[in-house]
Each structure stands twice: as C-alpha cells, then as structure tokens.
Amino acid sequence: MAKNQVVAIDVGSAGAKIVHIEKISGVLHLINAGVISFTDPDNPQHTSEVVQKLWNQLGIKRTFFNKHKIEVGIALPRGFVVTKRLPNLPPSTTDAQLPAIVEMAAETELPFQAEESIFTYHDVQRTAESLSVELVSTRRDTVTRYMEHLNETGVTPSAVIPSMLAIAAVARKALSGPTARTVIVDIGAERSDFCLMRGDTLEFSRGFSVSGNQLTRTLMTEMQRDAETAEQEKQNILAHQAPTRTWTRRFVGELERSITAAEREINGNDGEPEAITEIWLCGGGARVPELAETCQEQLQIPTQLWNPLHTDALDTSNAPTQVLETYGDALAVPLGVGIHLLNVEEPVSLLPTEVGVKRVESTRKHQQLIAAGIAGLVLLVLVLSGITWSRSQKSKVDLLDNQIATFGSLQVEADKQLALELILADKLTHRISPMDILHALSTLFKDRTKVAWKTFEVNNLDDLQKTRITFSLQANSYDAINSMERVLNGTNFFSNIEMGEVTTTGDERRPTYQVKVNCRLSREAVQMFAQKRYPKPVFEMEKVGNEDVHISLPPENFEALKKASTGENKEDEK
C-alpha cells in the first residue's frame, strides 16, 4: 500500500526535532514541525519523555484504524554510519540475487563483527563489465539506542535513515545542475555532517566533531563564562573575531580535510579534482555571525547559509510560520527523512530485520483484526436488522391478528344484525296476491262494454321469477283487442306479454272476439303494488300564532296509514 503520511524524528544531542509530512496527489505538504531542547541530554529517560512531549504538541493522532498508515522514520547521525564501496561484484548478478551477493561480500568488509552489525546497500552502479554498490552499516546497539527514544510514544519506527541520505533527499530539488558539485554541511550540536553532491547524486559523506557545542565550550574556556552565557555570546561574536575565530579555524580545517578526502575517494590519485561549485551551511551551528563569509574568504569557494524549507521540495503553506522561521534552517535531516520515505519505493534503512518482520506481522494482524472487526460489525448489523425485521413482522402479524379478531367479532355482530334485518325485511316485504293483479287489470280496463274477462289464472305466485299469469278476454272488435294489447305493453306491471290467437263467436251481425293472454310480473311490480296499497302520508304544516307549529295528516292519508299499521287491508283482499 502506498505511503501517504510520514512522521520523521531527529534526536540530536541538544534536542529533538519532529516533522509531519503528507503526500497528496504526488505533492508533499508539511503539516507541522517542532523542536524541543533537552535539559538533561545524558538521561535516556528524559530524552524519551521529550520526544513524547513533542509528539503530543504536534497533535499527531494514531488511532486503531490509522495506526499503521503513518510511517515513522528516525534519523541516524552520519558519525555512527560506515560506508564503503563494494566494486568487484559479479556483473552477471541479477537484482534478485544481489542481496545475497552483497551479504557474502559484506562479511569481509564490515568494520565490526557481523552479529553486532546492521547493514544495507544503495547506489547500484551496473555496466556490462562491472557491478558495484555502496555498503552502509552501523552497530546494532546504536540503532537500538536510538529506537529506545520512542519508547514513551509506543511507536515502532518503520525505517532508520542515515542522516547524509536525508540531507541529500531534501537538497536535490535545490541543486542547480546535473554536473555541479555542491558541498552541504549540517552543523549540529555535537557533530557535523559533510555531504558532497554531484547534481542530485550523493558522491561522498563524512561526519566530524567540530560543532555548536564545541564552540560553546571554547567560549566558556577563553571567556570564563558559564554554559548559558556562552550560548548567548556565540550568537553575537563574529566568526573571524576572537575567541570564536579559534573555533572557525578548526571548522574550516575540517572542511578542507573533508574536501580532500572526497576528491581522493572519488578520483583516486589520477587526474585533476573537479572544482567545488559552492558550499551550503545549515543547522543550528551555522548561525554564527558571518560564518559563511569567513568560509568563502578562506576556502575561495562561494558559501551561503541554506534553509531547506526555501526549496521546492515540499509545500509549507499550511505549516506554522513561527516554527519555520525559528527552526527552519535546522530541519534538514528530519525533512530529508520524511521526503526519502515518501519518494523512494525501497528506502535505504538500517532498521533491524527482526524489527521489520515484527512490524510487518503486526501490520498484517492489525489489518486482519480490522477486517474481522468490520466483518463482525456487518454481521452484528445484519443480526440486529434481522431481529428488528422479525420483531416488526411479528408486530405486523399481531396487529393483523388483532384486526382479524376485531373484524371477526364485528362480522358476528353484523351477521346477527343482518339476520334480524333480513327477518324484518321479510316481514315488511309486500306479498303480492291475486287480488293485486286483478285490481291492476281492472284499473287498466275500466270499460266493461268493450272488454270483459272470461278466465283468470295465476301460477307460482310465491316465486316472482316463475310466476305466470293467464287470462282470457272477450271484446266486441279487433280494435278493442289491439287497444288492450297496447295498454298491456305500456304498463309497468306486466312483462313478457304473449297474445294468443284471436277467435270469433256469435253471429255475423254481432260477432264476439276472444283472445288468450300469457304474461309475467315485472321487477317493479312488487314496489308498485305496495305503493298502491300503502300510499305515503302527506304532512301538512300550520303555524299557530307566531311560535307553535302544528303538523297534521289529511284524513284520507291518516286512515290509509292506520290500516297499513293495523293490518286492516286484509279486508280489501277479501
């Protein structure tokens, strides 16, 4: 998984420096940076507590979920690192075979016992005829001691980067050309790092002991001052003035020796050495007034103070301005550690193999634990969702059962009520009698001189759908029979009227015509017969005075209603 955040730590002899860098869309951003000085530098516990304090001040959050997403790199001073070029490796060695070949060659080249050392390699130079690498090694107990500075934070570093590689990483963006030779000197409290760059390639590096604390001790001795006063005085005395001049001479002498050693190692004894283009000074010790000008005058090489934050290596727009202005020139090593870890696929690290394996295993278990936690959470959500759904369904079923039970009781009551209403309706339903039919026929044919009945028959009167009415009529002319048929067809009492064959009886002078008629009752017959037998009462309203209202029934309507209620209409049927 690609790295996107790095916390880089530089633990010096005078204080601790931490920078927090994030990589977003290929651009490095400085999130925060801080520096804290030691009050008891010889106490390892105090050093660890200061690192923890600075970590907390920068607000670096390492939660359960991002614990292994933030890389933590720690710098190892150049003075504790040994480098040596391994020149005569088999040229046919493949990249996969190279680690094993380097390990065998290193056994005879390491300056200390193999079991006491940690080594790696970089700067692989390969041609058709040769293969060489630069071996980088240190003592195991030195790396362990620097890793213990992180005990209070509970953090295991993911890389231990030599300081000269860190300085080279942060300087590459600021270097002028591919062949220019630039010397970068980081002046620390106890030691100084010398790096020679050709373009963006680190050609040579070494550490020496002329440093800021040595200047403080020189001032204490020559000026008879205490340590605190000497620290203040060295910020004011010019580099070429006494007593700082003594320290400056030592420093310039170390620069000359370092340049000579670099030229000897790079060029051997053959040929003229290439000229140094310029010298950059950084670190807290470079703040001695006019130190760069003095070095330039004595070495005849352009020299300047260098602030690594003024390069294009990373974006500092969101970092705290006060920290950058105060400590920017002293942050070259931690910035370089972070840049090296973020930009290099396989960083040059002196982290012990067992620590790296343990960290990888811890990362794997951590990822498995997170995956198991997420799976458990998903399962829990599914179970809770299932329980909730089950309860919801049970509630719906219970509600439905209650509604069904309620509807069941309502249905029972409705059935009882319907049965009563059906009984009442049956009792109140008008029953058609033959007299109703005769009454209707007599109403239709009032003139007995033209039409007369001879026979009348009703079948199945209890079932109106099967009721069949048959009667014979006698008339004195065809016109009277035709008129009778029209009257029957125009009434709403009868349906399915079928006229039989007309027959003639009597003499020729006074013939008599007879016809047989079959019909059924219409659907409206029951209601029409009921209305005729029980006419609706008509209410009349009269005002008595101004307030009282008197409601009365006409006598004929009142008598009809009384007969309907007492059953006196049976006399009519008789």
Image (cartoon, helix red, strand yellow):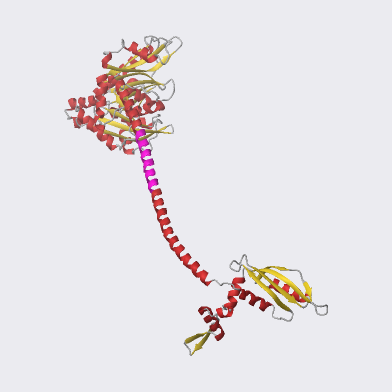
Q: Is residue 221 visible?
A: yes
* Relative depth, front residue between 147 and 271: 147
Main secondary structure type of the part rendered in magenta: helix
In this orientation, does residue 158 appear? no
As rendered, which of 538 and 357 lies closer to the eye?
538
Q: Nearer the viewer, residue 397 or 172?
A: 397
- The picture places residue 452, in percent across and down from the top left corner, at 71, 78
Q: How many marks?
A: 0
Instruction: Give the side of residue 207 with respect to residue 560, left or right.
Output: left
Residue at (43, 10) in percent of width and height = 92
Q: Residue furthest right?
A: 508
Q: Is 379 on the left-hand or right-hand side of 114?
A: right
Image height check: is 191 above or below 448?
Answer: above
Choose top left, top right, bottom left or bottom right for residue 487. Answer: bottom right
Q: Foreground: 562 or 145?
A: 562
Name which quarter of the figure residue 224 lies in.
top left
Residue depicted at 81% across the width and 78% down the height: 507
Q: Quarter of the image containing the C terminus?
A: bottom right
Q: Is residue 544 left or right of residue 365?
A: right
Q: x, y (%) of residue 415?
A: 46, 62
Which residues make up the magenta segment?
A: 370-391
Q: Quadrant of the N terminus?
A: top left
Q: Residue furthest bottom?
A: 545
Query: In the figure, residue 179 lies in which quadrant?
Result: top left
> Which percent across, then down, holds residue 43?
19, 28
Magenta segment includes 483: no
Assess whether residue 371 is covered by the magenta stretch.
yes
Relative image position of residue 14 (x, y in whole percent): 24, 29
